[in-house]
Amino acid sequence: MNRKKLLILCILLLAVLANQAQTESSNSTFYVKVYSGYGFIQPGSYKLVSTDNNAQGNATGNTSLSKQGLGGGFRFGGGIGIIASDFLNIGADLEYLSGADLTSNSGFSSPNGYSAFINTSITYTSLSITPHVIFKALSKPDYLIYNKLGILLNLPTELHKKEYDSSFNTTVVSTYVSNLEGTYKIGLTVGLNVALGVQFRLTNQIRGYGEIFANYLVLEPTNYDEKNAVVNNGTPTKYDTHITYIKSGQTSFSQTGNSTTYTTSVSGNTFNMNAIGINIGIAYRF
C-alpha cells in the first residue's frame, strides 16, 4: 500500500472513530492545548559522518560521528481535541521542530605529505500535523494515565548541508579548498507517533500533563541541489549538481560543462528521523 492510500485510510478511520464516539457520548467536551518538549534520543536515526573524497589510499586519520541524529531537538506545538467518552479522546496536534544541528569533523594525513581537514553540517526544521486517538488507561477525578496513537504527517521540508574541505600536499606543493552547499528537498512524509502520559487537574478547566513520546519517520528526498566553489592550486571553479530521486526506473546522467544532472532511485538515499523524548503542556477544557 502506497503512502497516499495509507494516509487516506488513516484519516477515514479517525473520522469514523470520532463520529462514533460523538454519537455514543452526549456530553462531549472540546479542549485546546499548548506544549513544548525535547527529543533526547534518536534510535536508528541518520547521523552525519565527514569523509574526504580526495584522500589518498594510505591516508589515515580521525572522523567524528555527529552526536545528534535527525529528530532530536526542541519542539513546540499546540492542538485541539474532543473528549469523546470516559475512555477516548480524539484530536490533532500541530508541531514545529527546531532540529538539533548535525556536525562532523575529520582529519587525514599520509606519509607522502598529504593532509586534509573536513567539516560537515546539516541543519533543518520541520512542521508536522498529527491526528491522534488517546486511550485513557486509568481515569480518576484528579488525574488520568493515557496512551496516545497518532499518524505523523511531516509537511514538506528541507535538509541544508554545508561542507568545508581543505587539503594540501607538501611533496608536490598542491592545495585544494572546497566550499559546498546543498539542499535535500523532502515531500510530505507519513510516520507514526505514540506516547504514554499523565494528566493532572489544576482547575475545573485547566489540566497539566507530561508524556514520553516516540516518533518514527523515514524521509525520502525528491531532489538534491548542490553548489560547490573549489579553488585548486589557486584556480577557482564552480560546480553545480542536480539530482532527482525516483521510486524506480533507469538511472540517467548528463553533464554540461561544470553542471551535472542525475536521475536516480531514492533507494539507499533515505533519512530516518526518529525521536524519543518528553513533552510538557497545559490543556484548557471548554
Image (spheres, helix red, strand yellow):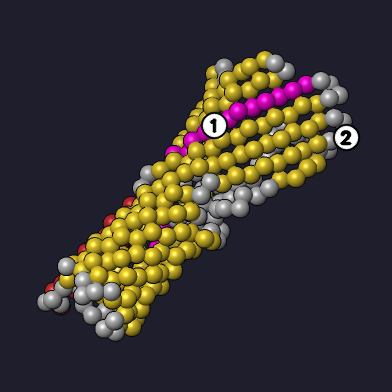
Q: What is the magenta range?
A: 174-194
In magenta stretch: residue 184: yes
Q: Position of residue 247 (x, y in %)?
A: 46, 44
Marks 2 and 1 close (CB-CB < 8 Å) = no
Q: Mark 2 packing: few (<14 Cα in 10 Å), some, or many (20+)? A: few
Image: 118 above or below 177: below
In the displayed structure image, the side of residue 215 where residue 149 appears, left or right: left
Say which mark, if any, is on residue 22.
none
In the displayed structure image, the side of residue 52 where residue 137 appears, left or right: left
User: Tag 1: residue type?
Assistant: Glu
Q: Residue at 57% across / 17% down in the picture?
A: 257
Which picture quadrant has residue 152?
bottom left
Which residue occupies the extreme left position in the image?
A: 26
Image quarter of the N terminus: bottom left
Which residue occupies the extreme front position in the image?
A: 203
Q: Position of residue 73 (x, y in %)?
A: 48, 54
Q: Nearer the viewer, residue 251 or 48?
A: 48
Per the image, the residue denoted by label 2 is 111
Per the image, the residue denoted by label 1 is 181
Q: Residue at 88% across / 34% down in the picture?
A: 111
Q: Nearer the viewer, residue 13 or 263?
A: 13
Q: How many marks?
A: 2
In the displayed structure image, the side of residue 144 where residue 205 appears, left or right: left
Q: Calculate the distance from the C-alpha at mark 2 to the C-alpha at mark 1.
A: 31 Å
Q: Is residue 90 visible?
A: no
Q: Residue at 23% across / 66% down in the picture?
A: 284
User: Tag 2: residue type?
Assistant: Pro
